[in-house]
Amino acid sequence: MNQTRITNTIGGAFLSLLMLGTTSCKEDASKKEVKKPNIIIIMADDLGFGDVSCNGATEIKTPNIDKIATGGIRFTNGYCASSTCTPARYSMLTGAYPWKNKKAEVLAGNAPLLIDTTWNTLPRMLQSQGYKTTVIGKWHLGLGNGNVDWNKEVTPGPRAIGFDSEYIMAATNDRVPCVYINNGHVDNLDPNDPIQVSYKKNFEGEPTGKNNPEMLRMKTTQGHNQSIINGISRIGFMKGGKSAIWKDEDMADLFLEKAKQYVTDHKDKPFFLYYALHEPHVPRLPNSRFVGKSGMGSRGDAILEADWCVGEFMKHLHKLGLDENTIVIFTSDNGPVTDDGYADQADELLGNHKPLGPLRGGKYSLYDGGTRIPFFVKWTNHIKPGESNAVVTQLDFLASFASLLNVKGIDLKDSEDHMDAILGKDLKGRQELVFEALGHKTGLRQGDYIYIPPYKGGHYISWGVMNETGNSKEEQLYNITDDIAQQKNLAETNPAVLKKMKERYQELTKGYKWGH
């Protein structure tokens, strides 16, 4: 693992210049208290580059998400580290490439905590600087030690890796257990109706989507045919815990209220809020207020719900007077997907909407549509609004915020300091990024070029409109600046660049060949 030490950067000085102390002008300047900015990361789930109107969507409007982009920097080259959920979130919180950890794959709902509790993480680094830290919403990074008793304290979890508190769904909204975890305990659990969870076999007498399709209010297209919760069949088997089971249609409102309450309670001291939306991940069951509003079925309606939540949350920040001293980042965990297991007409009702925008691929894919995502940063009166082509990535949050706060001598793993790019001062950003697709398959972006090595496996996923895996028997090389849609493979016509990219890719990934 790459052990990197922070050296003196302009981050600490920049922070001192931008943020005012709260002391009398008579006091010596060296004794002034630097007011640290609050940090909020709002992460959507499976939201594509082209799913927001500020990135070119015309069939759907996202005015509240757009306000973050237009009030700050709209990055056209913003990346997550992986085109699937768990690995991308893992990298964001740890600063570590997910393909270096064989276990960093899409996790089951009863998987153990993925992140090493001894590691320095983004929330732990911020804790060390006096921040209060919390995660609200989707987690999907594992809980417990692999043998969880959901009727007792569920640990280790977010609080073991640097969060002071948590209010999360246990895994994803399509996986059991379908309950919320409130600081290690299942919320609203009746001890007389204990929860049982299995990912191996069903509990006797419990209906499943496979055997009881007549009980479903939404049919499945692939998988998702095990325990039925709220008329929706999920991945995995669950019994009991009736009083604790969530209502899908109320999930967005609940997470929003928890996020608003958190900033209200912590407005007087620096805080870090990781607000993880569940939209538009399947099963898409937005509140009745949004049903039918998009004209694109439940996926479009879920995007409108997410946009409304962002708007209500940002209004609350403004009401509390926190705009100027809060850095807000809006992004997504990976690229978009339409049919992801449920027959909700996401494909049929797309119309002219292009979730990928000009990109190719989508969720699970090696192509850019899998990892190039909405990425907007707003810091009122500190970031000049505009657009940036700099390459920025969630992987670099750890090093960049450590630099901003002048934190030295910590293990940054694969994270690099690109705070200047995030603040709009550097228009280039990261020079190279090893991105990942489903199954730890990787490629390299370096400057204007993307290199994808040969991979076994089909070129198409067997479902959905956006279903290109990026797998090919041939090497692939694209000039992503000239050919954003990755239509022209330059591997044969540009052998010098191919050789350079291939050698660098092999150097960076040596010893990590899980996906080959």
Image (spheres, rainbow, N blue to C red):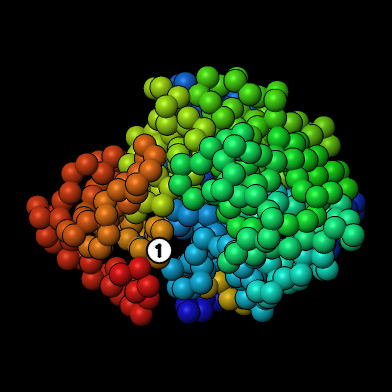
| Depth check, front residue: 149 or 194 | 194
Mark 1 — residue?
439
| Depth check, front residue: 17 or 371 | 371
Counting labels gives: 1
Residue 465's x, y, as percent?
36, 37
The answer to whether any part of residue 389 appears in the image is no
Q: Image check: 171 left or right of 497?
A: right
Q: Residue at x 54, y 48 (%)?
A: 210
Up-down relation of residue 34 to residue 156 (above or below): above
The answer to whether any part of residue 344 appears in the image is yes
Residue 115's x, y, as percent?
61, 71
Residue 482 is drawn in which quadrant? Answer: top left
Q: Residue at x 69, y 74 (%)?
A: 147
Residue 311's x, y, as percent?
69, 30
Residue type beneath disc 1: Gly
Determine the secondary structure under disc 1. Answer: loop
Q: Residue at x 80, y 50 (%)?
A: 242
